[in-house]
Amino acid sequence: MLMQTKEQQGLSRSQFPTDFIWGVATSAYQIEGAHDLDGRGPSIWDTFCQEPGKIADGSSGQVACDHYHLWEQDLDLIASLGVGAYRFSISWSRVQPLGHGAWNEAGFAFYERLIQGLVSRGIAVHLTLNHWDLPQALQEQGGWLERQTCEHFVRYAVEVARRFGSRCASVCTHNEPWVIAVLGHELGVFAPGFKSRAKAMLASHHLLLSHGMAVRALRDAGLQTELGIVLNLSPIYPASDSPADVSKARLDDGLVARWYLDPLVKGQYPQDVLDHLGSDAPAFSAEDMRTIAQPLDYLGVNYYTRNFSSTGNPWDVHSTGNEVTDMGWEVYPQGLTELLCRLHQDYAFPRLRVTENGAAFKDVLADGAINDERRESYVREHIRATKAAMEQGVPVDAYFACSLLDNFEWASGYEKRFGLVHVDYQTLKRTPKRSALWYRQFLQG
Ligand code: IFM
């Protein structure tokens, strides 16, 4: 039994509405493994991981947490935490190996088992269609640089919704399109590994367009489930009061946040960002913009840290004296409050959801236990920061801790651990960490 510490006092589940959604999050490529079983086709991450030097420890998601086989014990684990909601993604190439054409029934059967398992345990299903793992066969036809991928995505979305939609509490189209566009197409550090700003911006346009097309098609098909999109967002502050830093912070916010939020809500790209991009801006029509701006039930917010923009020396993350995670990200819970308030004020989505929040720290397994006090404190203080935004009138209705399990952390491989639950990658044994036990105690009220 964990003791209620001083800092914990003043925070309890009862301070949140009774229908507030408490969850944990994962994604397919990070946990499933079984990369070539039962007819699954390769995704761009299978390909990217094979390129030497791309993944810090040379690993891949081939086995990951083997959730494909261990899903039942993982669902029992979720239930044991007292969590009411599970956010996970479907591996597109598992259910449609080429990303178009034939469906893979064995792949759908896995998600059928998973969803039935969640429903029977009373855990709400929050399904993401695209958490970065585009089928490799579509990449070979141009991937997100091709408008045709939007059409394929819509057919995939409608088929998933036809089979599972009525049992889902929510369906999200894309997770963090900025990451796919910029890390995958401009910086080349994520799949598919391109290094071109023009490609990144074109990919971002097609991701947004396919989101709007899919939302429209799902509604036309009669789906009643809540629909949304998930963005990675952080407040971006100027590193100094200098006009140059202030205008850089505004532009950086434009490239990461407003480039996605403005079209989703206002049906237009921000003019200052278009001016800045010049010939790197994508071509788009007025009809595209109308399609992107479909009314949404919620915006998902993935928050981990804040950022600073500087025209001089890069911002030193240690300069504030705040804790810094194993990813090199400053722990700054107030940023979540500020972000949620700003999103509500500027964009007024019907609801905001914290769809990912968590921290990587080096864990020590001692006597079969992981005493991850810093992760516990991180989660607790971000829940408190969420409450602070709600007290200011922001309609937040969900918090998902990320991640349920230690897992494949993309280009960092298995070196960074975000899990509330420790995974021994040799034995695949799961061990709830102190942070998981704290979350359970918090949820038990
Ligand atoms: O693990 C990732 C997740 O897949 C997407 N959002 C950020 C997390 C931490 O890097």
Image (tube, rainbow, N blue to C red):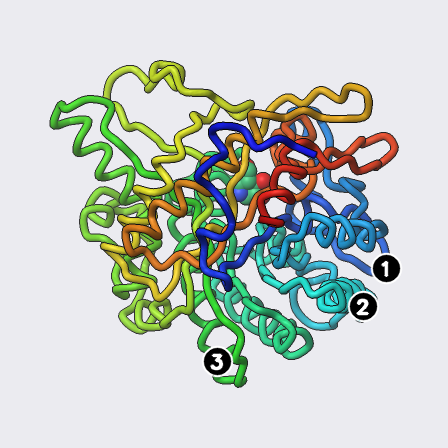
**Where on the picture, by quarter, is residue 50?**
top right
Q: Which residue is mark 2?
A: 109
Find numbered disc 3 in the image and state the secondary structure of the residue it sits on.
helix
In contact (CB < 8 Å): disc 3 and disc 2: no
Q: Find out whether the residues at labels 2 and 1 contact each other: C-beta distance under 8 Å.
A: yes
Residue 229 visible from this viewpoint: yes
Q: Nearer the viewer, mark 2 or mark 1?
A: 2
Q: Please give the name of the residue rendered at 23% of the width and 55% of the height, measured from the top-left corner.
A: 346
Residue assigned mark 1:
38
- Examine the image and state in which quarter residue 294 appears: bottom left
Query: Helix or strand or loop: what does disc 2 sit on?
Result: helix
Under mark 3, the amino acid is Arg
- Give the quadrant of the N terminus: top right
Asked whether, in this view, residue 230 is left or right of residue 101, the answer is left
The quadrant of the rendered image in which ligand 1 is seen is top right
* Measured Cα–Cα span from mark 2 to mark 1: 10 Å
Marks counted in the figure total: 3
Q: Position of residue 307 (x, y in %)?
A: 35, 31
Secondary structure beneath dot 1 equals: loop
Residue 343 is situated, as x and y percent measured from the top left of the image, at 30, 52
Q: Residue 286 appears at what percent x and percent y?
A: 27, 70
**Residue at mark 3:** 219
Reading the chain from its start, which is encountered first: label 1 or label 3? Answer: 1
Vertically, is 56 above or below 95? above
Would you say 298 lies left or right of 289 here? right
Q: Earlier in the sequence, mark 2 or mark 1?
A: 1
